[in-house]
Amino acid sequence: MSPICLALIQGGVGFAIGAGTNDLAIRWIFHTVFAKKKREIAQAVQRVVSSELMTPDKVACRLVSPQSSAALQKAVEGYLADVCARDLPSMDALAAASGQRTLVAATLDTVIESAVEELARRLSLPAAVRAFTDPFGKATAKLIAAVARQIPLGRLDRFAKPEVRSLLAERLVAECSTFVQRHTDELMQETHIWDVIYDSIVGYDEEKMEQITRSIANRELRGVTLWGGLIGFGVGFVGSLLVHALHL
């Protein structure tokens, strides 16, 4: 066999060994290193994301940006329009469905009683008259509240016109933005939101991670494998020629 053919054969063997070794090394990284160091990797990623990439200030800034506020207001207006378009039953029926009948009754009683008290205060009745009429006023307030709880609410858009809903949504968004700016750091700490990153990485399958990485960096990983093969080919080809030259 000619020296060139022998060198090409040995170069081909070197190419196969080099490419195969690099491909095995890539697989070993995912199936061995990633599997064993998964928790350390998860902690490192969690630390970088929480302390540098998505700090509470950056999250709050994005949440209260004009684009986010506009999107939130649109969503709130849509929800209010949907609620106002429903044919709602009485408050007692709604409370019974939610299991909060006692709470709703007590709340409505308090609201109407406060309204009656405010009306009596504004009428500036003498103290003697107030002492006499107050018990009747409270009894009347409870009666009004009991009757009101039985009246079907119907469609709320009779009262909440689009302009009112838009104004209410705008106010709610403004209050939400203020709350987010003040409490984002506290909320993120209390909810342990960054644990989602850690838990997701720890629970992720190594084969899926390899597939995702290969799909994103397929060209680069193929290049690593190809370079390993070319280096192996070069070593085998040149080595064969050197061996042949030494035997001459």
Image (cartoon, grey):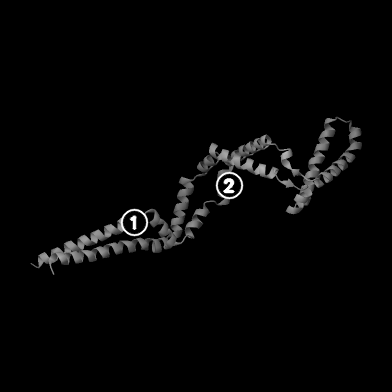
Which residue was labeled with disc 1? 221
Residue occupying the far bottom of the picture? 1
Image coords of residue 144 (percent x, y) = 84, 42
Q: Closer to us: mark 1 or mark 2?
A: 1
The amino acid marked with disc number 2 is Leu
Q: What element carries label 1?
A: helix
Residue drawn at point x = 54 percent, y = 38 percent: 67
In the picture, the disc for residue 187 is: 2
Judged left or right of residue 98, residue 27 is left
Nearest the viewer among 169 and 64 is: 169
Task: Using the rendered view, name the quadrant where residue 33 is placed.
Answer: bottom left
Task: Using the rendered view, name the quadrant where residue 210 is placed.
Answer: bottom left
Residue occupying the far left of the picture? 248
Judged left or right of residue 196, residue 238 is left
Judged left or right of residue 206, residue 80 is right
Q: Quadrant of the C terminus?
A: bottom left
Nearest the viewer among 106 and 57 is: 106
Image coords of residue 107 (percent x, y) = 77, 45
Image coords of residue 86 (percent x, y) = 71, 46
The amino acid marked with disc number 1 is Leu
Nearest the viewer among 54 and 212 is: 212
Residue drawn at point x = 47 percent, y = 52 percent: 46
Separation of residues labelled 1 and 2 (CA atoms): 41 Å
Question: How dense is the environment of label 1, judged by Cα within 10 Å: few (below 14), some, or many (20 and up)?
Answer: some
Image coords of residue 164 (percent x, y) = 68, 35
Question: How dense is the environment of label 2, judged by Cα within 10 Å: few (below 14), some, or many (20 and up)?
Answer: few
Q: Is mark 2 on a helix, strand or loop?
A: helix
